[in-house]
Structure formats: C-alpha cells, structure tokens
Image: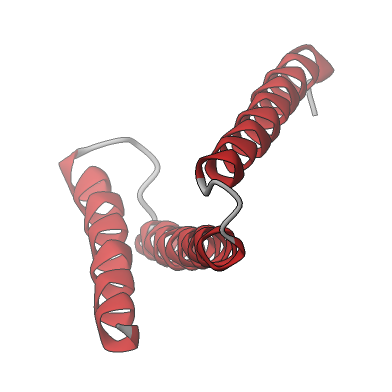
Amino acid sequence: MNLDILLPMTLIVSVVYAIKVVVEARNRRHLLLAADGSTELALALLRDQERQGRLSSLRWGIVLLALACGFGVVQWLGWTEVGPGLVAVLAGATGAGHLVFYAISRRRD
C-alpha cells in the first residue's frame, strides 16, 4: 500500500466525520431547545432522528452491497478497462440498491 495516498485520505475522512458528528450534535441540541420544555415532543424528535439514522445505515448497506455485486460481475466478466459496459453494470447495481431500499422502506411504513 502506498502510504503517500492512504494517509492524506484517512486524514480527510477523519476530519469530515468529526465535522459531521459535531454538526449532528449541534442540530440535536437545537431540536431539543425548540421543543420548549415539552418532553413528549423532544422524545418524538429524538426517536425520529434515530429512525432516520437507521434508515440511512440501511440505505448505504444495501447500496454498497449492490455495488460489491456489480464489481463482482465486472471481475467475473474479466473486464479490465473502463468502458460503457463496466459503467452500466456499476450504475445499474447502484440503482438496484436504491430501488431495493425504497421497496423495504415503503414496506416498513
């Protein structure tokens, strides 16, 4: 592995994740302050935020699994150069992942 590439990428991902955590905590605090002391409203807001987080994890899990399958198909077909077929397989796998997520989320609601 080339550390000249891996280290800066890891640093960037770490900084972005830290910013995301801080922004989410700040937004959560503002939501709770906006509830004006209503415990029921604050709990409902926190539950909804937790549900959104779970759905986000589900979405990315499904999409990444579909992309992994797409990369497996590309490897299985022996394609080594980027071409329209390779892009179509990966775009189709990503689209299929999003459609599966949509179907699962619609069934849950």
Residue 87, horizontal then vertical, whole percent = 24, 44
Q: Which of the pair 5/60 is nearer the observer? A: 60
- On the picture, is 57 further left or further right than 82? right
- On the picture, is 85 further left or further right than 68? left
The outermost residue toward the bottom is 107
Q: What is the image's colouring?
A: secondary structure
Quadrant of the frame with the N terminus: top right
Q: How many marks?
A: 0
Identified at 34% across, 86% down, the residue is: 108
Quadrant of the frame with the C terminus: bottom left
Identified at 68% across, 18% down, the residue is: 12
Q: Is residue 68 above or below residue 34?
A: below
Q: Is residue 23 above or below residue 46?
A: above
To which quarter of the image does residue 9 belong? top right
Identified at 35% across, 49% down, the residue is: 79
Residue 51, horizontal then vertical, whole percent = 51, 68
Identified at 66% across, 24% down, the residue is: 19
Q: Which of the pair 56/29 is nearer the observer? A: 29
Q: Which of the pair 52/58 is nearer the observer? A: 52
Q: Which of the pair 27/54 is nearer the observer? A: 27
Q: Is residue 105 above or below residue 42?
A: below
Residue 43, horizontal then vertical, whole percent = 59, 65
To which quarter of the image does residue 106 belong? bottom left
